[in-house]
Image: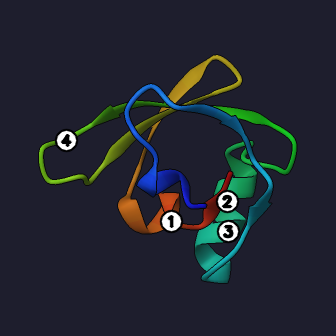
């Protein structure tokens, strides 16, 4: 299931990154890799961007980027 579809305060483990290679490459550079714990910390009213916590840092991701993260 995609991280973007999860409810607020969801905590899970990244299973895979799929989708547009430009998005996947950027996510890997930010530390989003298989096996890493990720938490959905915030959503704007329209769902874009999302606030995601990984490795103790909070990162704002576009919905298209969060859709690439399988948890």
Q: Is residue 69 above or below residue 21?
A: above
Q: Position of residue 11 (x, y in %)?
A: 60, 29
Label 4 residue SS: loop
Tell me: 20 left or right of 47: right
Q: Which residue is mark 3?
A: 24
Along the line of sight, the residue nearer the viewer: 54 or 10: 10
Q: Position of residue 66 (x, y in %)?
A: 50, 57
Mark 2 vs mark 4: which is more N-terminal?
Answer: 4
- How far separated are the C-alphas under marks 3 and 2? 11 Å
Give the crowd class for mark 1: few <14, some 14-19, many >=20 residues within 10 Å.
some
Q: Which residue is mark 2?
A: 70
Mark 1 vs mark 4: which is more N-terminal?
Answer: 4
- How far separated are the C-alphas under marks 2 and 4? 21 Å
Label 2 residue SS: strand
Q: Position of residue 27 (x, y in %)?
A: 65, 56
Which residue extends farthest bottom? 20
Which residue extends farthest left? 45
Q: Which residue is mark 4?
A: 44
User: Between tags 2 and 4, which lies in front?
Assistant: 2
User: In the rendered structure, are the residues bearing label 4 and label 3 in contact, judged by CB atoms less than 8 Å apart?
Assistant: no
Mark 1 vs mark 3: which is more N-terminal?
Answer: 3
Tell me: 55 left or right of 60: right
Mark 3 vs mark 2: which is more N-terminal?
Answer: 3
User: Between tags 3 and 2, which lies in front?
Assistant: 2
User: Between tags 4 and 3, which lies in front?
Assistant: 4
Give the crowd class for mark 4: few <14, some 14-19, many >=20 residues within 10 Å.
few
Along the line of sight, the residue nearer the viewer: 56 or 16: 16
Q: Which residue is mark 1?
A: 67
């Amino acid at each position: 299931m995609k991280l973007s579809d999860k409810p607020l305060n969801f905590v899970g483990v990244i299973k895979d990154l799929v989708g547009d290679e430009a998005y996947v490459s950027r996510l890997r550079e930010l530390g989003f890799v298989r096996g890493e714990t990720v938490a959905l910390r915030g959503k704007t009213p329209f769902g874009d961007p999302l606030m995601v916590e990984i490795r103790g840092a909070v990162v704002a991701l576009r919905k298209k980027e969060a859709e690439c993260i399988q948890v």
